[in-house]
Image (cartoon, rainbow, N blue to C red):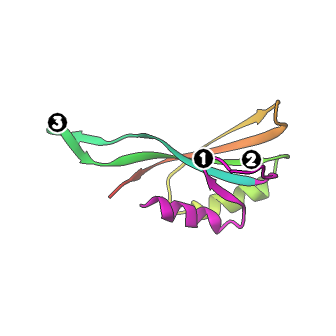
Amino acid sequence: MKIEEIKKMLEATGLPVAYDHFKKQTDPPFLVYLLPESRNIIADDCVYQGKVLVRIELYTDKKDPELEKVVETALADMVWTKEETYIDSEEMFEIMYEMEVMTE
């Protein structure tokens, strides 16, 4: 999967989407995605298959299970985990989805 495909998949939600951060202030809800680390498969002292961790962060100013369902529908073909936290200083919820994706 290419990074452009991840972006298109997220844009299908209708939410604002950016890689890592927005260049200007954006009101929630919005999505941010990033590739914080590789998790390559190693064999015979070399990278046998490239694999990357994909982190997708949904930011909302209130708990919104319906909006989470929209994001999860966009991720329907992926295997992901989900974690939630409230950011006091920003007064926002962060719903984080993580998955591993094979690279070309």
Instruction: Name the element at disc 1.
Output: loop
Q: Nearer the viewer, mark 3 or mark 1?
A: 1
Frontmost residue, 95 versus 38:
38
Query: Amino acid type of disc 1?
Result: Asp
Label 2 or label 1, whichever comes before in sequence order: 1
**Quadrant of the frame with the C terminus:** bottom left
| Magenta range | 1-29
Query: Amino acid type of disc 3?
Result: Asp
Q: Give the crowd class for mark 3: few <14, some 14-19, many >=20 residues within 10 Å.
A: few
Q: Give the crowd class for mark 1: few <14, some 14-19, many >=20 residues within 10 Å.
A: some
The residue that disc 2 covers is 59
x then y, percent, for residue 61: 84, 46
x then y, percent, for residue 37: 44, 39
Instruction: Name the element at disc 3.
Output: loop
x then y, percent, for residue 64: 81, 52
Q: Give the crowd class for mark 2: few <14, some 14-19, many >=20 residues within 10 Å.
A: many
The residue drawn where x is 70% and y is 58% is 69
Label 3 or label 1, whichever comes before in sequence order: 1
Question: Which disc number belongs to residue 45?
Answer: 3
Q: Residue 96 falls in which quadrant of the image?
A: top right
Classify 88 as above or below 75: above
Report the side of 66 relative to 34 (left or right): right
The residue drawn where x is 74% and y is 51% is 24
Whether residue 57 is in magenta: the answer is no
Q: Are marks 2 and 3 in contact (CB under 8 Å)?
A: no
x then y, percent, for residue 13: 68, 65
Whether residue 21 is in magenta: the answer is yes
The residue that disc 1 covers is 20
